[in-house]
Amino acid sequence: MSFAITAAVVAVAGAGVSAYGQYQAGQAQKEMANYNAKLAENEAIAKEQATAAETQRMRSQKERALAAQRASYAKGGSVITEGTPLLTMAEQAGLMELDILQMQRTGAMSAGASKSEASLSRYSGKQATTGAMWQTGGTLLQGAGSAYGTYKATKD
């Protein structure tokens, strides 16, 4: 009789330890996923800030180039508000603006990818926690069943 009770207690205790380990493993996976998500979010912020700084640098460069072009035309005696000089400067400004827009688009896509990575990581952490909870419950039920089976087998 005492063997049956001891065996059942050991089975339940083993299931409890195993279940706790599964739960802790799920929590550790969630924490790692949240850490990775934070890294990805920080990377997205850094990319957005770098894109903003590069945009400012390119706009300043564009203004300097156009000012130099205007000065060159003026020095040559050309009227810069009409004709070829105006069309040339307008085309140059348009091409520079397209470069800026393309750089902003690339930066936004890169930051968006990092944000998506963060979301996926957080989702993965939630799934790990949910899976661990199901495993924990299953282990506890299995341990209880095993304890009952052991007890029942020795009782008969």
Image (spheres, rainbow, N blue to C red):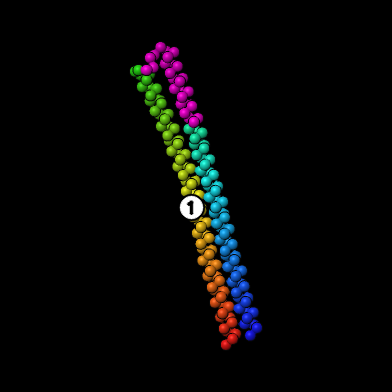
Image quadrant occupied by the C terminus: bottom right
What residue appears at the point 45 percent right and 35 percent down from the top-left corner? 103
| Magenta residue span | 56-81
Disc 1, SS: helix
Confirm whether the magenta stretch covers residue 132.
Answer: no
What residue appears at the point 51 percent right and 33 percent down from the top-left corner? 53
**Residue 79: x %, y % from top left:** 38, 14
Instruction: Please identify the quarter of the rendering in which residue 97 is found.
Output: top left
What residue appears at the point 44 percent right and 13 percent down from the top-left corner? 75
Instruction: Please identify the quarter of the rendering in which residue 104 is found.
Output: top left
Q: Compared to 82, does 137 lie above or below? A: below
Farthest residue in the top direction? 77
Question: Magenta-highlighted stretch: main secondary structure?
Answer: helix
Q: Residues within 10 Å of mark 1 (few under 14, many from 20)?
A: some
Confirm whether the magenta stretch covers residue 67.
Answer: yes
Image quadrant occupied by the N terminus: bottom right
Q: Compared to 35, does 71 lie above or below? A: above
Name the residue nearer the viewer: 76 or 58.
58
Farthest residue in the bottom direction? 156
**Residue 151: x %, y % from top left:** 59, 82
Determine which residue is flagged by label 1.
120
What residue appears at the point 48 percent right and 51 percent down from the top-left corner? 119
Amino acid type shown at disc 1: Leu
**Residue 99: x %, y % from top left:** 43, 32
Q: Compared to 143, does 123 lie above or below? A: above
Farthest residue in the left direction? 83
